Image (cartoon, rainbow, N blue to C red):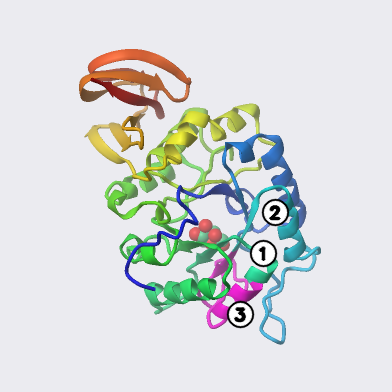
Amino acid sequence: MGLGKLRDGLAPTPPMGWNSWNRFKCGIDETIVRETAEALLDTGMRAAGYRYVVVDDCWSEKRRAANGDVLPDRTKFATGMKALADEVHARGLRFGMYTDAGTMTCAEYPGSLGYEFRDAARFAEWGIDYLKVDWCHTDGMSPRELYTKWALALAATKRPIVHSVCEWGRAHPWEWAGSLGHLWRTSWDILDTWESLLAIIDRQVDLYPFAGPDHWNDPDMLEVGNGGMTESEYRAHFSLWAILAAPLMAGNDVRTMSDGVRRMLTAPEVIAVDQDPLGKQGTRIARDGETEVWRRDLADGSCAVALFNRDAVERDIAYEFAGRALVRDLWAREDVGEFRDGYAARVPSHDVVMVRTSTRP
Ligand code: GLA
């Protein structure tokens, strides 16, 4: 693997999909996966861009087979991973799985250390399109070396597989993972709380230079719809992820989500920002106490702007620009009008107003 960042076309825009962990933890099984795949179609999530169905930790038997193969848990995944992957593919979706670079996964299932090529070959036979490689139980090991091994093992399968590096940002993966993986976690696990969200957002501020098509910063999977935050807080979460060009991996139960959650997760104009083909991650351009302005440059020359209120009370937040611009509200999906030299809005507590500004000659 050279030093150049990946540009292999496997993740030209940030990957979108669903992952079992945030909602189901170890209570995962093939019925949930199957019903989730169906629900992604029925709810319009697939049409909105969600493609990957990823089974996270706790899918395997606690011991490898005598020949070294890792085996799917025979009660949770009685059908087997190949058949399940086929079902997912038949719905026009892609299938993803999880392993760990160390001796055990975080939930203490078999890790892949020393089995990288064997496991990659097995996963490829099952038909995976995405692999998340976690970093628990790796004492004293070099993430750069082990993820290089994983990149080689995945390449050796000859199957296109998105490589999700899950090292939590400890060894500054943004400095080296871009040549090895398509996305890399930049922070500890997200929790379904406002405090966790803010802590993660603050860690992303300086990472924008490292992201681009086929290599993305990953501030972690979505908590939208899991119930621990308010609608405003989830709107802020989803808006900031779009500004950050973050992978959008839904982490809720899409089979039973409310209509409000479904509308948030499928908001077309916010997703369009996340998936903008220029692939340029946004930045925090202003901060004043508990109010912030984030901006992302888009391929058509316009900008996405998030007026972000972290305060416990509503705030007026202004975004300044030169000249005249047409302002469109991306959540309301309506033009607000033409403004000169700036745009200001009253933003509710723990919420975001998100607009696109197109400057006028
Ligand atoms: C780590 C990862 C999480 C999840 C769990 C599974 O904590 O960061 O995203 O995969 O392991 O045990």
Residue bounds of the magenta highlight = 98-122
Cβ–Cβ under 8 Å for marks 1 and 2? yes
Where residue 46 sits, quadrant-wise, is top right
| Up/down of 277 relative to 11, above or below | above
- Residue in front for this viewpoint, 261 or 295: 295
Tell whether position 111 is magenta.
yes
Percent position (x, y) of residue 28?
A: 69, 56
Q: Residues within 10 Å of mark 1 (few under 14, many from 20)?
A: many
Q: Is residue 21 visible?
A: yes
Tell whether position 11 is magenta.
no
In three-dimensional space, the C-alpha distance between marks 2 and 3, rounded to whole angstroms, equals 23 Å
> In the rendering, which numbered label is found on residue 118?
3
Direction from residue 344 to residue 231 in the image, left or right: right
Residue at 56% of width from left, 35% of height from top? 265
> In the rendering, which numbered label is found on residue 89?
2
Name the kind of residue labelled 1 in the image: Gly
Residue at 35% of width from left, 36% of height from top? 298
Where residue 172 sits, quadrant-wise, is bottom left
| Up/down of 17 relative to 186, above or below | above
Q: Residues within 10 Å of mark 3 (few under 14, many from 20)?
A: some
Direction from residue 326 to residue 41 in the image, left or right: right
Is the CB–ligand 1 distance for label 2 below 8 Å? no
Q: Secondary structure at mark 2?
A: helix
Q: Quadrant of the N terminus?
A: bottom left
- Residue in front for this viewpoint, 7 or 39: 7
Mark 2 vs mark 3, foreground winner is: 2
Mark 2 and mark 3 lie on one chain; the one further toward the N terminus is 2
Q: Residues within 10 Å of mark 2 (few under 14, many from 20)?
A: some
> In the rendering, which numbered label is found on residue 127?
1
Residue at 47% of width from left, 48% of height from top? 247
Mark 1 and mark 3 lie on one chain; the one further toward the N terminus is 3
Q: Secondary structure at mark 1?
A: loop
